[in-house]
Amino acid sequence: MNMWHGIYGHERVVDYFRRSLASGRLGSSYLFLGPPGVGKFTFARKLAQALLCLNSAESPLEPCGQCDSCRLMDSSGHPDLNLIGLPEGKNRLPVELFVGDRDHRHQEGLCHDIALRPRLSRRRVAIIDDADHLNTESANSLLKTLEEPPRGAILILIGTSRSRQLPTILSRAQVVPFDPLPTDAIAALLQNLEIASDPSHASTMAARCAGSLSRAYELADPELCDLEQRLATQMLPAAFDSVRLAAELIAVVNQAGKDAYARRQRLRAVLQMASMLFRSILRGACGAAEEHADPECKAVKGWLELGPAVENCALAALDRCLEAEEQLDRNANQATLIECWLDDLAEVFSRVPAFDARATIR
């Protein structure tokens, strides 16, 4: 299994940047898009290390690991690297991170810092994690930097999908897609991180992770794993009861405690579980091998027995799950969001023929 400096599964992206550097066509603004938990941020950090390394030629993308720049990168104290991420408890990237607070507008923040002369390396690099959570004001503050980047500066934004990016960002950054991690890469990571107890356990978990390491952490949590199994069992058209399931999920979210951020993250996990289920159904309906889905997932098998109505129904259900996650980011009332989401799924499920759910889930 190939990997680049400990990063599994993204050799295609490594080759893309190597070719760009070799041809002198390295861009100034990139948008990394792909599922959560596949290593986009880790890749961006290692790419920045390679670009800032003092001893190695850039085109092979091989940081030496020994120079002052590489050591500072490892200690997260590099003067030519700016890291921006979603503050804890927030659901939007505040404009202050980019242009400073009201008393220091354009005197601090990422847009100010990226324009400064590099202090150690030949360029400056900025990584903006959680680009899904840019609001209009924050995105607008970035426009001048994206349109007229300082000489040698590189900005890397990290998100999950095109649909969650503002048009002003999409039109000004080169999109670099990241694929889900291969099952063998996930299994190796699970063992290296001691999330799985043995190779057999790692392989079983990896088959259910949909190529996402963050999903592996969820599956390692017995409470979330049990919730996923219950949710999959109830996400069958003939067995679907939106009222009963809404009450159950509201209780699950409330169990996260009084902290608004914790409750929002719990609901996000529920929505992502449902999204992954419908993605697995779509892959199965299109005849794709279910490499990332649990091969024994009875809910997926039950859906695939429904015939030609499956694709449109699963796609509509997936769209509604993604829309619900966007509404969560806009601070929708969580109980109302759950009820409306499930009511809409009930309407979607009504478009497919009924079948004997008991034969599928027993």
Image: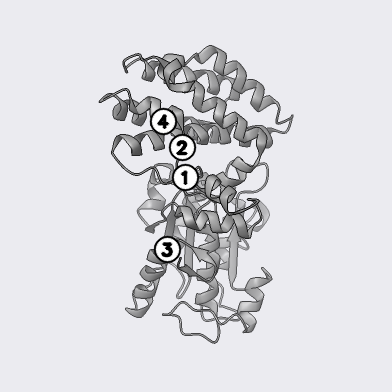
Q: Secondary structure at mark 3?
A: strand
Residue 138 located left or right of residue 257: left
Callout 1, which amino acid? Ala
Q: Nearer the viewer, mark 2 or mark 4?
A: 4
What x and y, as percent, mark residue 360?
43, 21
The numbered mark, 2 or 4, whose residue comes first in the sequence reads 2
Instruction: Compute the Cα span from label 2 to label 3.
Output: 30 Å
Answer few, some or many: residues within 10 Å of disc 2's Cα (few below 14, many 20 plus, some between 14 and 19): some
**Residue occupying image coordinates x 57% and y 43%:** 92
Q: Badge 1 is on which residue?
A: 210
Mark 3–mark 4 distance (CA, rounded to whole Å): 39 Å
Q: Is residue 110 above or below residue 261?
A: below
Crowding near the residue tagged with mark 1, few <14, some 14–19, many ≥20 C-alpha atoms within 10 Å: many
**Mark 2 or mark 3: which comes first in sequence?**
3
Distance of label 4 from label 1 (alpha carbons): 14 Å
Q: Please, what secondary structure does the residue beneath circle 1 have?
A: loop
Q: Secondary structure at mark 4?
A: helix
Q: Residues within 10 Å of mark 4 (few under 14, many from 20)?
A: many
Residue type at the position of mark 3:
Ser
Residue 161 or residue 178, whichever sits in front: 178
Classify 10 Å Cα crowding around label 3: few (below 14), some (14-19), many (20 and above): many
Q: Position of residue 47 (x, y in %)?
A: 50, 70
- Determine the residue positioned at 48% across, 44% down: 136
Query: Visible in this render: residue 190?
Result: yes
Q: CA distance from mark 2 to mark 4?
A: 11 Å
Q: Is residue 344 left or right of residue 254?
A: left
Q: Which residue is mark 4?
A: 300
What amino acid is found at the position of numbered circle 4 in the picture?
Val
Please give the residue where the numbered disc 3 appears in the rendered image.
29
Q: Are marks 4 and 1 in contact (CB under 8 Å)?
A: no
